[in-house]
Every structure is written in structure tokens, then in C-alpha cells.
Image (cartoon, rainbow, N blue to C red):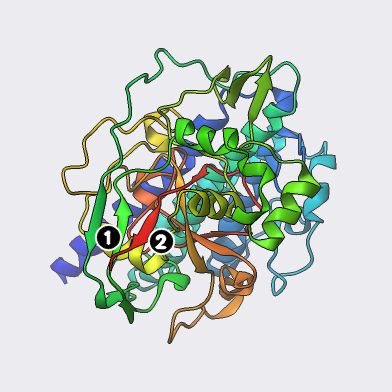
Amino acid sequence: MVQQSIQTTELRNQLLHSYETTRMMTNTLVEPLETEDYTIQSIPDVSPPKWHMAHTTWFFETFILKEYKESYRSFHEEFDYLFNSYYESVGSFFPRHSRGLLSRPSIDKVRRYRKDIDEEITKLINGAEEAILVEIADLIEIGLHHEQQHQELLMTDIKYNFSINPLKPIYRELDSIETAKAYPIEWLSFEGGLVETGINEGNGFSFDNERPVHKVWLEPFELASRTVTNGEYLAFIEDGGYKRAEFWLSDGWSTVKNQSWEAPLHWENKDGEWYNFTLHGLVPVNNEEPVTHISYYEAEAYASWAGKRLPTEAEWEVAVRDQPIEGNFVEDGVYHPVASVKKGEGRLQKAYGDVWEWTKSPYMPYPGNKPLDGALGEYNAKFMSSQMILRGGSCVTSQSHIRPSYRNFFAPDKRWQFTGIRLAGDVE
């Protein structure tokens, strides 16, 4: 009994610490914003910062407080409609593309909402009996990882919203900017064979789309020691990459023409010089930094032009699984990819952080995969169509959120996230 009591106290303290730390990070990330910044939604893909703050709070209220606190009364009945994202089994929701039309609730009301729910969750954690505490612990953990996903979306959405403003607002000044020179690419070979990928429930936190462990056959392959730089991608542009259909998938080529793409998102050509809009303002393109804001179509086209290909997600996972989770993450406060300043030394450089790396793998369930029961079963499975897998995290991903088995996914034309390219090849 004493041992159980100690374990319960440890679980309680761990949940309280994780909850406070994660929720505080959201508050830290919105700190530089002006009141007017909280409501803007410049395209349907992005959401207003105010909505992210409220939606992550709605998640805790809906899936935990309403289920586990007796006689719980909603903070505001209409918030169920306004801040539900896509959970059909929970109820109807306000159209995603119109979130920026909501001047109310005010940002002050949203802050009160967050504070109120934080107090209620803290009381629940402190007062729950052991059996209930164990039950809600998994839900709180999912909620915190869900909030970390929205912290990343929050940063990329702020960047896009700022990018369309002719004033080119600066989110946060940097004391210094990394100017190191990237090391030349080394090619690292891997034997392949019958390998296991994925993760089983009980081996640390994972989303249902990462499960279960299953076998995959890999032919021998090679991976570049680092991701593609701005300078290397600029060579593709200067060689007519956006004007030569032979490098592009058919849908990609149609997108290039329809969207008039000629460079990565956030690049601007001013008097023959390329500039890059960053969260630190508009700056000249740094040739040594990893290229980012690249769609899957652009990544495929570049790989074709370079005589290589993109890795599969299984290749990527096998190659990085024994490496420490180190890199440039949101906790570093840089919010921008930085140059690879270490020599390869037989290992992949910057496998984690900086930029999400596109793979050739479509987003599909693993063999034997089973979505979660109930409404949370909508979290991942319903999106397994017409999307491609990315791996590794970015400069606005939390370090505690990423792992070798983590599967991110976006449609092949999307590029407002910090997405980049690591090349792969076949070994004969």
C-alpha cells in the first residue's frame, strides 16, 4: 500500500508538472503578439492564434472535465461549437475557413477560459482517487501532445499571417544569427533487409497511427548526411527547375502552373536578389541553411533533378532510431532552421528539429493498426487519404514531442509548415 501511495504521488506530480509546463509554453509563444494579431486568418489552412489557444483548452474541457468531474458546467455553451475542430462524434463545429471572422470571444475571454480550465484540471489531478487518476493520465498526456502539435501550428500560422503584411512584421528579434558554413553532404549506406518499424502501446507515449510494430523489407539504401540547403535548392531554380516539366509529378506540375510557383514559400526576389521572410523579419537568403517551406511536389522535383529520390518512412526510421533526439527545437527560441555545422562522421546530421523531412510514403495505417475507441478515434485515422508522411520535427517542434516513430502528414501541395528535403538513393 505504501508503494502504491508513492507511485500515485509521483504520477500526480508528474501530471501537474507536464501540464503546467506545456500550457505555459503556449502562453510564452503568443507573448510577442499584438491584440490584433490574435484574430487574423489569412488563408483557410491557418487558424487565428486565439483559436489555437481556445481549441487546445476545449480539448481538456471536453474529453476530461465533462467526463470526470461531477456536475461540471461548461465555461460557455457555445464554445463547444466554436472550438471543436473536426470531431463529428462530439457535435457540429464552426467552419474552419471562417475562424478569422470571429472577433468574439475576445482574447481576454479566451485567456480567462484557459485559466479557468487550468484551475479545474489541476483540482482534478490533485483530488482524483488512484483509479481515476490512472484513467485520466492517458487522456491528459494525449491532450498535452495535442497542444504541442498546436503550438507548432500556431508558430507557422503566425508566420504566414505576418508574411502577407507589406510591413513584414517581426515576431521576435534575434540577438545573433547563425552564419556557419554547412558541411558537404556525405552518403551513408544502410544494409536494409527485414526490419521492424513502428511502436507498441506501453513503450512510452505514441499516437495510434504509429502502432503497432510490424515488419518491412528494405533493399539496401543510402541517405544524405544532412538536408538540402538553400544554396543547393537555388541551383535547381537557376537551372530552370520550376520551368521544366520533366522533373515534376503531373499533379505537381499543374500546381506549379496554377499557383505560379517559382521558389519556396516566403522567398521574394527583389532586384535580382532572393530574400527570405522569417519570424525575425525579411532577410537575404542564407545559402547554408536548410531549405524549408517546400511542398512534397517540390521535394520530389528537386530529388529527380538531383538524380536521387526521397526516402521511405521505414528507411528514415531505421536510419535514425539509435540517434539521440537532439537538434534545433522550439525550446531553443530560434524558430528558424540553422546550418549543419558538424561533419557527418558516419551519422545523419540534424535528423531531428530544423525541418520536417518529406518521405515517399503515403499516409496509410500500419498492418494491424486499430484507432482509439470513441471520439479520439477521429484524431488520426480519418485523415489517411491523399497525404504524405514527414519525419523528424522542425525548429518549432517541442523536443519532448518527437520520437523515431512519429508520423506527421500533410497533403502534397502544402508548404506553410517548416518542411524540407533529405535525399536518398539505392545501393546496388
What x and y, as percent, mark residue 74? 69, 56
| Cα separation between marks 2 and 1 | 10 Å
Locate residue 41 relative to residue 351 in the image: left or right.
right
Residue closest to the eye, 131 or 84: 84
Residue closest to the eye, 27 or 409: 409
The residue at 78%/58% (across/down) is 81
How many residues crowd around disc 2 within 10 Å: few (fewer than 14), some, or many (20 or more)? many
How many residues crowd around disc 1 within 10 Å: few (fewer than 14), some, or many (20 or more)? many
Instruction: Quickly name the residue at label 1.
Output: 319
Quadrant position of residue 104: top right
Q: Which quadrant holds the C terminus?
A: bottom left
What x and y, as percent, mark residue 301? 57, 52
Secondary element at tag 1:
helix
Amino acid type indicated by mark 1: Ala
Locate residue 97 relative to residue 238 in the image: left or right.
right
Instruction: Quickly name the residue at label 2.
Output: 311
Q: Earlier in the sequence, mark 2 or mark 1?
A: 2
The residue at 24%/54% (across/down) is 188
Locate residue 389 relative to residue 185 in the image: left or right.
right
Residue closest to the eye, 30 or 420: 420
Q: Marks 2 and 1: which is nearer the front?
A: 2
Amino acid type indicated by mark 2: Pro
What x and y, as percent, mark residue 257? 77, 48
Q: Which mark is residue 36?
A: none
Q: Which quadrant holds the N terminus?
A: bottom left
Q: Are marks 2 and 1 in contact (CB under 8 Å)?
A: yes
What x and y, as percent, mark residue 409? 54, 60
The residue at 63%/36% (across/down) is 263
